[in-house]
């Protein structure tokens, strides 16, 4: 036990169905050992689906603690974070999923003991939250918005990474048979400048963090606290290029340099014909959709970027 820290009360929301929790009781024991080792006294809630996670988050807020820890994968973390936006409470993350993209973007170690240590040694940082509105529904997201053909890649990513040949065949068929939609985009930046775009395209990404796949960084300089989304427009690529890009996302390859990049604090999108929309992997409908960045809306304990990455961002 690390006695350098005073005892810290916290709430702990744990998804026992997360990828890293497959060893059951052993993982539960390691989780409590890791928290006890840094003097965190956690009141625990187990939750699996979105309804249970939302209920657990509300109960955690009622405890009167300042730190809410979530242990699970990206979906679990982002559902809990939805209930903490603008609350003033601090979110702590113990990654326990299959991919852990958000933890990677926040430089949080996947080792359980190291992540628990960061909860005590790290500093809460404000990060941006993005409110997505579509068809009368609203949801906060923290990583990315996906429109069009690439939604199929995200829906099938786990099967593709496991070399599921059926899923690969389905993806190839979708890309070969795909037709572009006419996209109508309106973007507003931090300085109030507006840009309207009408173009044929197969997909749009709007990103608050750099990772698409576990090792696929769309761009190294995407930042979660700069008040803007980085928008990537997949227009002017042939079907072979699109298929290569889809496989790159699913298998942690590299982005195509011809993809157009824009920045926006507010983005509205309408597609003709309509296209599927996802925010952090959750189905949003088919649009039209509006995305609005809310700067510093969530406090998270994040790690320090590697030195090489810090130098790249300064250049």
Image (spheres, helix red, strand yellow):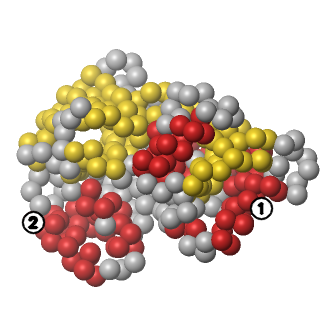
Q: Residues within 10 Å of mark 2 (few under 14, many from 20)?
A: few
Q: Which mark, residue 177?
A: 2
SS category of the residue bearing label 2: helix
Residue occupying image coordinates x 13% and y 41%: 271
144, above or below 292, in the image: below
Q: Which mark, residue 82?
A: none
Q: Residues within 10 Å of mark 1 (few under 14, many from 20)?
A: some
Q: Please give left or right for residue 232 compared with residue 118 in the image.
A: left
- Outermost residue, top side: 192
Closest to the observer, 47 or 279: 47
- Residue 24 in picture, x, y percent from top left: 61, 72
- Residue 59 in picture, x, y percent from top left: 57, 39
- Residue 158 in picture, x, y percent from top left: 38, 69
Closest to the observer, 306 or 169: 169
- Residue 200 in picture, x, y percent from top left: 12, 45
Residue occupying image coordinates x 63% and y 41%: 68
Residue occupying image coordinates x 80% and y 55%: 36
The image quadrant that residue 242 belongs to is: bottom left
**Which label sits in the foreground, 2 or 1?**
1
Which residue is tagged 1?
A: 33
- Which quadrant is the N terminus positioned in? bottom right
Q: Please give left or right for residue 31 compared with residue 62 in the image.
A: right
Q: Please give left or right for residue 181 compared with residue 29 in the image.
A: left
- Outermost residue, right side: 3
Of marks 2 and 1, which one's residue comes earlier in the chain? 1
79, above or below 15, in the image: above
How far is the residue under mark 2 from the one under mark 1? Answer: 52 Å
- Which quadrant is the C terminus positioned in? top right
């Amino acid at each position: 036990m690390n006695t350098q820290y005073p005892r810290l009360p916290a709430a702990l929301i744990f998804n026992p169905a997360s990828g890293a929790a497959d060893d059951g009781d052993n993982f539960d024991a390691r989780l409590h050992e890791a928290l006890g080792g840094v003097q965190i006294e956690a009141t625990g809630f187990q939750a699996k689906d979105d309804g249970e996670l939302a209920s657990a988050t509300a109960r955690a807020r009622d405890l009167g603690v300042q730190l809410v820890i979530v242990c699970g994968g990206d979906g679990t973390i982002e559902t809990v974070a939805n209930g903490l936006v603008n609350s003033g409470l601090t979110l702590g993350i113990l990654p326990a999923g299959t991919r852990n993209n958000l933890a990677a973007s926040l430089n949080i170690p996947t080792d359980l003991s190291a992540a628990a240590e960061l909860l005590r040694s790290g500093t809460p940082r404000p990060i941006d939250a993005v409110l997505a509105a579509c068809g009368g529904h609203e949801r906060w997201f923290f990583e990315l918005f996906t429109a069009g053909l690439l939604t199929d890649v995200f829906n099938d990513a786990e099967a593709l990474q496991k070399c599921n040949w059926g899923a690969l065949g389905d993806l190839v068929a979708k890309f070969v048979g795909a037709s572009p939609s006419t996209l109508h985009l309106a973007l507003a930046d931090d300085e109030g400048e507006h840009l309207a775009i009408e173009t044929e395209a197969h997909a749009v990404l709007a990103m608050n963090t750099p990772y698409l796949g576990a090792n696929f960084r769309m761009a190294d300089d995407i930042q979660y606290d700069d008040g803007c989304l980085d928008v990537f427009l997949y227009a002017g690529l042939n079907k072979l290029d699109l298929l290569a890009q889809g496989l790159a996302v699913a298998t942690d390859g590299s982005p195509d340099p011809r993809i157009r990049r824009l920045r926006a604090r507010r983005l509205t999108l309408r597609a003709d014909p309509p296209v599927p929309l996802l925010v952090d992997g959750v189905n949003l409908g088919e649009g039209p959709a509006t995305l609005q960045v809310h700067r510093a809306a969530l406090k998270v304990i994040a790690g320090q970027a590697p030195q090489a990455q810090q130098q790249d961002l300064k250049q």
